[in-house]
C-alpha cells in the first residue's frame, strides 16, 4: 500500500476491533486497540485531558497523562499514520473510515420514514451490518454506553427493514431481519411482531402462531406478563 493511500485505512469496531490497511489486517497491541477505539468513537478531535481521564480512570491525573504520552509514542506504522496528533488533542485522519459511523448512517437512513429505503440499503449486506454488536466483550464504561446506544439503534433499524422487505415481496429477507431483532432482544414485543408480520406475509400461519406462543412463554416466564393487545391482535384470527 502506498504511504499516502489514506482511503484504504479503516477501523472496524462492529464484531470486534480490527485495523485495516488496504484490506489487510494490521496487528496492534491491546493498549493501541483501546486508544484507537476511543478516538474512533468520539468522531472528532479529542482533548488529551479527556482521553487520559477516560482511558486511565483509576490513575492520578499526572500518571494518566504519562500513560497517554507513552501509548501515543509506542504507536508506529499504520497505527500512527491513521492519527493526527496535536499538542493538545488527537483525532483520526479525516480520510480514515470507521465502520460504526457508516453503520449508524445506514440505520438512520432506514429509519427515515419520509423517504423510501434506497435499493442499496434494502440488502442482505445491510442485515449483516445491523446484526453486529459494538466491541463485544469490552466492559469499559465508555464502550458500554456506545454499545448500548448502537444496540438500540440497530434493533429499531432491523424492525423497520422487515417492513421494507415485506413491501418489496422479499419475505425470506424479512424473516432473517426479524429473527436477528428477536435474537438481539428476546423480550421485545415489537421484534416478535415484526417476525409474525413477516411469517403472515409469506403465508406461514403456523410459523406466526409458533412465534407468538414463544413470545408469550418468554414474557410469562421472565416478567409474568401477557403479550400486549397489539401483539395478540396479530394472531387473533389464527387461534380458536
Image: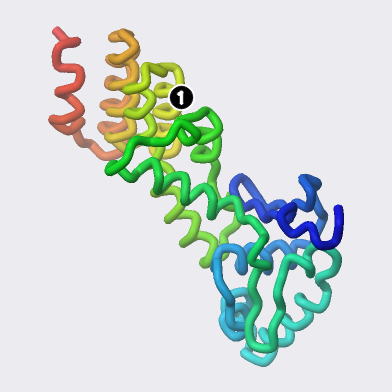
Q: Residue at x 78, y 52 (%)?
A: 21
Count of residue discs: 1
Residue 88 lies, with reference to residue 149, above or below; the image says below
Camera-nearest residue between 160 and 74:
160
Residue 26 lies, with reference to residue 124, above or below; the image says below
Q: Residue at x 70, y 74 (%)?
A: 84
Label 1 belongs to which residue? 176
> How many C-alpha atoms fall within 10 Å of the one at disc 1: few (<14), some, or many (≥20)?
some
Residue 165, x across and y down, in percent? 38, 25
Residue 108, x across and y down, in percent? 40, 48
Residue 103, x across and y down, in percent? 51, 47
| Mark 1 element type | helix
* Residue 109 in view of the camera: yes
Q: Residue at x 63, y 77 (%)?
A: 56
Camera-nearest residue between 55 and 78:
78
Residue 167, x across and y down, in percent? 32, 23
Quadrant location of residue 148? bottom left
Q: Residue at x 19, y 10 (%)?
A: 238
Amino acid at each position: 500500500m502506498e504511504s499516502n493511500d489514506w482511503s484504504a485505512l479503516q477501523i472496524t469496531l462492529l464484531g470486534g476491533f480490527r485495523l485495516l490497511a488496504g484490506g489487510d489486517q494490521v496487528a496492534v497491541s491491546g493498549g493501541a486497540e483501546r486508544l484507537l477505539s476511543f478516538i474512533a468513537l468520539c468522531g472528532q478531535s479529542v482533548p488529551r485531558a479527556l482521553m487520559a481521564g477516560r482511558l486511565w480512570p483509576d490513575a492520578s491525573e499526572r500518571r494518566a497523562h504519562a500513560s497517554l504520552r507513552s501509548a501515543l509514542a509506542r504507536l508506529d506504522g499504520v497505527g500512527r499514520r491513521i492519527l493526527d496528533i496535536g499538542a493538545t488533542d488527537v483525532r483520526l485522519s479525516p480520510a480514515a473510515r470507521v465502520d460504526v459511523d457508516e453503520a449508524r448512517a445506514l440505520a438512520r437512513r432506514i429509519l427515515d420514514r419520509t423517504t423510501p429505503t434506497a435499493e442499496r440499503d434494502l440488502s442482505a449486506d445491510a442485515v449483516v451490518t445491523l446484526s453486529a454488536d459494538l466491541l463485544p466483550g469490552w466492559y469499559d464504561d465508555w464502550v458500554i454506553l456506545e454499545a448500548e446506544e448502537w444496540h438500540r439503534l440497530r434493533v429499531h433499524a432491523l424492525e423497520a427493514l422487515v417492513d421494507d422487505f415485506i413491501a418489496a415481496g422479499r419475505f425470506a429477507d424479512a424473516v432473517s431481519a426479524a429473527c436477528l431483532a428477536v435474537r438481539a432482544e428476546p423480550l421485545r414485543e415489537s421484534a416478535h411482531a415484526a417476525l409474525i408480520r413477516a411469517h403472515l406475509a409469506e403465508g406461514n400461519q403456523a410459523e406466526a402462531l409458533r412465534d407468538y406462543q414463544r413470545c408469550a412463554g418468554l414474557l410469562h416466564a421472565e416478567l409474568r406478563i401477557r403479550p400486549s393487545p397489539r401483539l395478540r391482535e396479530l394472531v387473533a384470527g389464527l387461534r380458536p
